[in-house]
Image (spheres, rainbow, N blue to C red):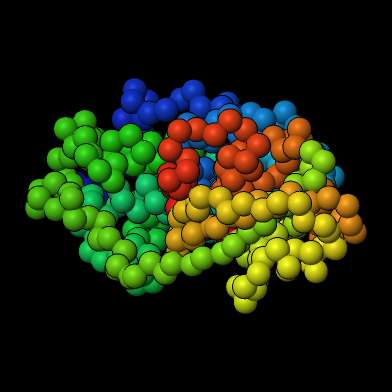
């Protein structure tokens, strides 16, 4: 069996009986809904995305509704999904479609790739699923399938290896049924040719797979070269007054960009209570150091050291950067997951073992 000549057809045939057909975003070729699903699925598992996808569409049923919404509302619905730059770029791109394209989503992959937050592979997937364009994709699942099927050595994130994989992906495109073929690649990588414990006995590519033939399934694709993971530390202030908590708007770019978070206590401050009174003009009633929380990002680990302050009368800052939020409204606010966990620990029932520290077990995230 020729590894290249019938590669696409084997996947298309396999998908007919074994692929996924009932995911919410598979029921439409609306580019807005396809685009939303592709962005949400970046670095996030399908089961996690499904409820977010439904809630997002209920609030923003079309691209005009998304473009018209305040960024705060978008971030609030994204809260907990991680990788918040995706939400910010989604909002920017929606406005670009309205302002620059007359509300019509671009129909070609090269035009789609010019929108904020959409790379080459995502643009190709949207173009193929929505408009039938013959375009190759190269997401993590496809990279793994190609590396194993054709014995491609090297870490796929390296430029030379990625270039080779793009050339291979484009050479394998079928003349027809491109959308089905692309979905089949994604499904095979997600359900059969998985990173750990792949089900080679159920794979339609098993007979020609180089990795299987050479007993290299476990070593392909090559892992990212290991680097020491930096450790960072930050102190944050949980400032409470009369059933409210003071939150601070993060800068647009960087960690948790645009979200509401807890004010950071400068590293140089040796007396946080004095800093609090001078910075916010409040009268301190009590303070308490809380258990640390550890959170993993893509490129570093962060230890968050919260200090809880109960404050009384004073200036009580509320401006464009700071906002007093009622504790009853925390669930609907756009908060990073670690911040929400800290606040839940402060203002909800404390779980046994929390005093020993809080470990965030979610997958590592990028800003």
Q: Is residue 326 left or right of residue 135?
A: right
Whether residue 98 is visible: no
Q: Residue at the far bottom: name it.
A: 268
Q: Residue at the far left: name it.
A: 214
Residue at 23% x, 49% y: name it: 149
Residue at 50% x, 33% y: name it: 351
Q: Position of residue 184 (x, y in %)?
A: 39, 37
Q: Is residue 171 left or right of residue 84?
A: left
Q: Position of residue 178 (x, y in %)?
A: 46, 41
Q: Residue at the far front: name it.
A: 285
Residue 251, placed above or below residue 293: below
Along the viewing direction, whichever of 326 and 137 lies nearer the viewer: 326
Q: Choose top left, top right, bottom left or bottom right for residue 325.
A: top right
Image quarter (top left, top right, bottom left or bottom right) of the C terminus: bottom right
Q: Choose top left, top right, bottom left or bottom right for residue 52.
A: top right
Residue 17, placed above or below residue 324: above
């Amino acid at each position: 069996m020729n590894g290249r000549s019938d590669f696409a057809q084997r996947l298309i045939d396999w998908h007919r009986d074994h692929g996924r057909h009932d995911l919410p975003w598979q029921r439409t070729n609306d580019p807005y809904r396809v685009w939303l699903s592709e962005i949400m699925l970046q670095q996030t598992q399908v089961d996690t995305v499904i409820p977010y996808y439904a809630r997002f569409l209920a609030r923003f049923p079309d691209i005009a509704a998304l473009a018209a919404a305040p960024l705060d509302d978008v971030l609030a619905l994204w809260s907990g999904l991680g990788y918040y730059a995706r939400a910010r770029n989604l909002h920017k791109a929606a406005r670009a479609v309205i302002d620059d394209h007359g509300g019509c989503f671009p129909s070609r992959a090269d035009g789609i790739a010019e929108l904020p937050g959409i790379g080459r592979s995502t643009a190709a997937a949207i173009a193929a699923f929505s408009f039938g364009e013959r375009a190759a994709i190269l997401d993590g699942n496809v990279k793994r399938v190609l590396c194993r099927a054709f014995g491609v050595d090297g870490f796929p994130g390296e430029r030379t290896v990625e270039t080779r994989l793009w050339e291979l992906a484009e050479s394998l495109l079928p003349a027809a049924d491109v959308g089905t073929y692309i979905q089949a690649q994604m499904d095979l990588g997600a359900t059969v040719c998985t990173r750990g414990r792949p089900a080679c006995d159920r794979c339609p590519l098993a007979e020609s797979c180089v990795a299987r033939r050479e007993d290299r399934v476990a070593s392909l694709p090559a892992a990212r070269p290991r680097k020491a993971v930096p450790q960072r530390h930050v102190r944050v202030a949980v400032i409470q007054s009369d059933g409210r908590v003071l939150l601070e708007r993060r800068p647009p770019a960087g960690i948790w960009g645009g979200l509401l978070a807890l004010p950071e206590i400068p590293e140089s401050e040796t007396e946080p209570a004095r800093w609090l009174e001078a910075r916010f003009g409040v009268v301190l009633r009590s303070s308490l150091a809380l258990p640390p929380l550890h959170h993993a990002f893509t490129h570093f680990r962060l230890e968050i050291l919260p200090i809880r302050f109960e404050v009384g009368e004073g200036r009580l800052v509320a401006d464009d950067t700071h906002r007093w939020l009622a504790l009853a409204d925390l669930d609907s606010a756009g908060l990073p997951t670690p911040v929400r966990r800290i606040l839940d620990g402060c203002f909800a029932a404390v779980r046994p073992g929390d005093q020993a520290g809080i470990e965030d077990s979610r997958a590592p995230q990028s800003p």
